[in-house]
Image: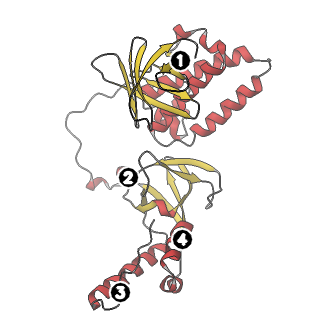
Amino acid sequence: MALLSAVGRGGASRTVLAVAALTALTALAFAQADGPDYFRITGLKKEDRVNVRRGPDAEAKIVGKIPKDTDGIKNLGCKGGLTQKQWTKASEAKKKLAAKERWCQVEHGGVKGWVSGRFLGEGTAPQAEVKPEEQAPPPQAQTPAAPAATPSFDCAKAEKNWEKLACSDNELAAADREAARLYQLASDAMNARPGFEQLLDSQNKWRGQLATCFDRECVSEMLVKRVHQLRRDFRDTRTQDASGISMGPLLARCEGFPQPIAVTFVNSDPGFVYLEWMGGVVVMPHVPSGSGALYEGSFARFHLKSDDALLLVPGGKAEMNCKLEKGG
């Protein structure tokens, strides 16, 4: 969180000086105390996430990530900041540094950890914790509940945040089932053969990364990424495509682009496309289109019609004409 600074200057009116002093004391109180009951994430760029770490240190292990503008993050206590005496004598540079040195222990999505104070602002309590008398009365007519999602695991035992998301989202559940199906094919084929340990290591590493996801976008990207990795690295995963919902990797050769792009589709209704090239990766969800298959993401777009496609990659200046072919 940014510490507020005093604004009084020589020659300013007493009113301005009083406001400045009150502002400084308010910032100081927030720096010393544990802060509000709930935080929200502030100061992030578009699509960024804040790291949640095991300890109050920038080098501590990451145990989760919280998306931009998330509210209702429970405050478990903060440490760091300046004392009143230090605050009144500190330069603006030191005050800014104090904000960076402040860490707060938080809880969000079932995960506890530490977040740098410079990303935290005062938030509001989650709706579930609002007193019953403060809640609006339920509508008279209730929409029938959607059928429960069925991922590859038992939702009754779901503990991690990504598992709970997959248990409430049919598209995530379908992508999870596909990742699990491909891993089983790879595992059966590689069992007792050279490379089996590498398969296990890559699966464990991926699961560790997936466990840091707090939001749907992160979970979908991680599931689609694993589908692509398994299809790319293990030939046996591509032998039973009629039983699954994925296809690829294919190759997209684009005019003006120096290298081919690997393309994998996950048709989880509506589905995703995964694009990978040297130094770049992008995952895009399928969106409605008047013709062809259209996928759009952050600063990226992939519009496929038969074997022809228009592609805009992040940072690109214009769409490129591409040709899709086998052999990714």
The x, y position of residue 242, in whole percent, is 52, 7
Q: Is residue 235 above or below residue 130?
A: above
Secondary element type, mark 1:
strand
In primary-sequence order, the first of circles 2 and 1 is 2
- Name the residue located 38 percent from the left edge and 57 percent from the top edge: 125
The answer for how far apart the CA atoms under marks 1 and 3 are is 64 Å
Image mark for residue 78: none
Image mark for residue 251: 1
Location of residue 195 by image quarter:
top right
Q: Residues within 10 Å of mark 3 (few under 14, many from 20)?
A: few
Residue tagged by mark 3? Answer: 9
Mark 4 and mark 3 in contact? Answer it, CB < 8 Å: no
Residue tagged by mark 4? Answer: 97
The x, y position of residue 111, in whole percent, is 54, 49
Can residue 151 be seen at all in this image of the molecule? no
The answer for how far apart the CA atoms under marks 4 and 2 are is 31 Å
Residue depth check, mark 4 versus mark 3: number of the one nearer the observer = 3
Q: Residues within 10 Å of mark 4 (few under 14, many from 20)?
A: some
Secondary element type, mark 2:
loop
Q: Residues within 10 Å of mark 2 (few under 14, many from 20)?
A: few
